[in-house]
Amino acid sequence: MRNERGAALMIVLVAIVGLTALAAAGMVITETELRASQNQEAGTTAFYVADAGLQQYLGTKVEATSTD
């Protein structure tokens, strides 16, 4: 009877360690995905800001040459 209790305790401890490892891995994956999403958003914003600046420059240049 005593040996069975020890075996049950070991099984429960192994299960808890395994679930803790899975939870930690899930947290790391979630953090990585969040950072990737933030980087993609920053890149998209930078692209559109640069595009708007270029369009404004080209529009100003076209207007300046067409009024001369």
Image (cartoon, rainbow, N blue to C red):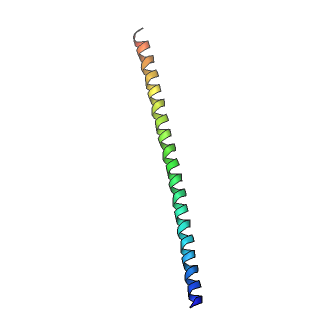
Instruction: Tell which of 1 and 14 is nearer to you.
Output: 1
Front residue of 61 and 37: 37
The residue positioned farthest toward the bottom in the image shown: 1
Q: Pick the quarter of the image with the N terminus.
A: bottom right
Q: Is residue 28 above or below residue 61?
A: below
Which residue is pictured at 57% across the width and 75% down the height?
13
Q: Quadrant of the C terminus?
A: top left
Please tell me which residue is depicted at 54% across the width and 71% down the height of the picture: 16
Please indicate whether residue 24 sits to the left or right of residue 56 in the image.
right
Q: Nearer the viewer, residue 35 or 18?
A: 18
Question: Does 33 appear above or below 62?
Answer: below
Q: x and y percent of residue 10 in the render?
A: 58, 79
As drawn, the residue found furthest toward the front would be 2
6 shown above or below 35: below
Number of numbered discs visible in the structure rendering:
0
Q: Residue at x 52, y 48 (%)?
A: 35
Q: In percent of the image, x 49 and y 34: which residue is there?
A: 46
Name the spot of residue 3 as percent of width and height, x first: 59, 89
What x and y, as percent, mark residue 11? 55, 79
In the image, taking residue 19 as reference, residue 66 lies left or right, namely left
Which residue appears farthest toward the top when viewing the image?
Answer: 68
Q: Residue 8: percent from the left, percent from the top?
A: 55, 83
